[in-house]
Image (cartoon, rainbow, N blue to C red):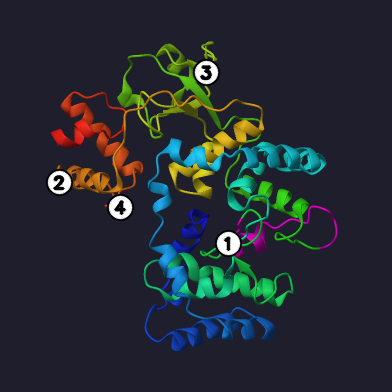
């Protein structure tokens, strides 16, 4: 989900007493409060009538509480998502819409393969855009008290798009309120939407030219740096300072070259000042990548490291790179074992965030510290041996 920017907006809006709103309680009473807010924002009858039809959707709540897909390892997730079908369709679309991709890169600095990778992963190039009623989904998540600050600010933008006739009142999309072929939240649709073919409309559900140009504009707004790389597969030496790996440890590329890191084919890395981090999603024995400042944009799009590495790799495949080398990583932990590990790390005084069985940034950082303390290679990959010792 593209909720990082929404969260920043929510922090600003919900931080002021004038915007503070209650969640929970009687849904119809809550909906009346939302109606008053929409009226105050200038929403007309078409939008207000649509809001009156919003329903509480328990399927949305179930999805919000069960995102177990990101508990998969990078190899598991990427092997499933970077499919032959997507590679074939991506190549075809990059050729079919080559002129639009070229305009997008010229105007916004975002390469076609990067856009195509998100297009593929989000909806299979528009084939699967979601069957949730978008307005009911957003109303449900805004009414629910788990994360209302992320979703309530999306309702008025959606009503504005309905009011303007850009979207129908019964528009369908993803469970978290994203719309269109690259799953854009309503506020981004409204603010970042671009007419890619000059027909006077911004149709992100049906018009590939609009999808490509809007996605490029959206990525640039999140900080995409034109002409710079996003991710590169590398080879690591048998021994190095593994504690130096991780997204938070950024160094000039010359640093990694001096440490013995090479390009995938064994050739030397450029010994330059390009900022980069060495990431080992499955430890020192598994795949290895250098990530660059543009990778931060991927994490703005989706905060899952497994998803973003997969999106970055798929973009590299579309750009002509081969499949990454899986190598031979140690077996990881099950979700339940990961929860046990997180509890043990927390008991040692480390902040791992939520005990959810997912190997997120907090857990990786804490794990590296404990690995170093115990004399293990501090590569941030949890193993059976380490769990037993802890």
- Asked if the residue at tag 4 contacts the one at tag 1, i.e. Cβ–Cβ closer than 8 Å, the answer is no
Q: Which residue is mark 1?
A: 178
Q: Is residue 124 above or below residue 90?
A: below
Magenta span includes 195: yes
Residue at 72% x, 48% y is 212
Q: Residues within 10 Å of mark 2 (few under 14, many from 20)?
A: few
Q: Residues within 10 Å of mark 4 (few under 14, many from 20)?
A: some
Q: Which residue is mark 2?
A: 347
Comes first in the chain, label 4 or label 3: 3
Left or right: where 265 falls relative to 195: left
Magenta span includes 233: no
Comes first in the chain, label 4 or label 2: 2
Write down the region rendered in magenta: 183-200
Q: Position of residue 353 (x, y in %)?
A: 29, 50
Left or right: where 226 falls relative to 276: right
Q: Which mark is residue 264?
A: 3
Residue at 54% x, 11% y is 267
Left or right: where 86 falls relative to 333: right
Q: Quadrant of residue 110?
A: top right
What is the quadrant of the C terminus in the image? top left
Residue 15 visible to the viewer: no
Residue at 44% x, 18% y is 256
Q: Which residue is mark 4?
A: 356
Helix or strand or loop: what does disc 3 sit on? loop
Of all residues, the one furthest to the right in this rendering is 199
- Asked if the residue at tag 2 contacts the one at tag 1, i.e. Cβ–Cβ closer than 8 Å, the answer is no
């Amino acid at each position: 989900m593209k909720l990082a920017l929404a969260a920043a907006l929510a922090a600003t809006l919900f931080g002021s007493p004038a915007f503070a709103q209650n969640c929970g309680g009687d849904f119809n009473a809550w909906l009346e409060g939302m109606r008053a807010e929409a009226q105050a924002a200038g929403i007309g009858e078409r939008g207000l009538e649509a809001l009156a039809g919003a329903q509480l959707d328990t399927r949305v709540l179930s999805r919000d509480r069960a995102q177990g897909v990101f508990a998969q390892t990078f190899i598991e997730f990427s092997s499933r998502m970077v499919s032959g079908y997507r590679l074939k369709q991506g190549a075809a679309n990059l050729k079919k819409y080559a002129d639009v991709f070229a305009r997008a890169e010229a105007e916004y600095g975002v390469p076609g393969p990067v856009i195509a990778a998100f297009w593929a992963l989000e909806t299979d190039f528009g084939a699967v855009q979601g069957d949730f009623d978008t307005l009911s989904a957003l109303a449900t998540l805004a009414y629910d008290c788990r994360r209302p600050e992320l979703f309530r600010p999306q309702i008025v933008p959606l009503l504005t798009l309905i009011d303007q006739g850009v979207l129908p009142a019964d528009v369908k999309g993803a469970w978290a309120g994203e719309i269109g072929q690259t799953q854009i939240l309503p506020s981004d649709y409204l603010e970042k939407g671009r007419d890619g073919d000059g027909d006077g409309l911004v149709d992100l559900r049906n018009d590939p030219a609009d999808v490509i140009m809007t996605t490029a504009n959206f990525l640039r707004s999140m900080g995409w740096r034109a002409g710079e790389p996003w991710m590169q597969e590398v080879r690591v030496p048998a021994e190095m300072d593994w504690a130096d790996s991780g997204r938070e440890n950024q160094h000039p590329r010359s640093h990694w070259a001096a440490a013995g890191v090479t390009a995938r084919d064994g050739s030397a890395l450029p010994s330059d000042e390009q900022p980069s981090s060495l990431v080992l999603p499955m430890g020192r024995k598994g795949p290895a990548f250098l990530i660059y400042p543009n990778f931060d944009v991927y994490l703005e799009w989706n905060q899952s490291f497994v998803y973003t590495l997969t999106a970055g790799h798929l973009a590299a495949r579309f750009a002509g790179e081969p499949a990454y080398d899986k190598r031979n990583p140690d077996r990881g932990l099950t979700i339940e074992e990961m929860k046990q590990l997180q509890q043990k790390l927390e008991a040692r005084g480390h902040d791992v965030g939520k005990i959810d069985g997912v190997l997120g940034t907090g857990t990786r950082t804490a794990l590296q510290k404990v690995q170093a303390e115990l004399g293990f290679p501090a590569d941030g990959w949890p193993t059976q041996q380490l769990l037993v010792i802890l």
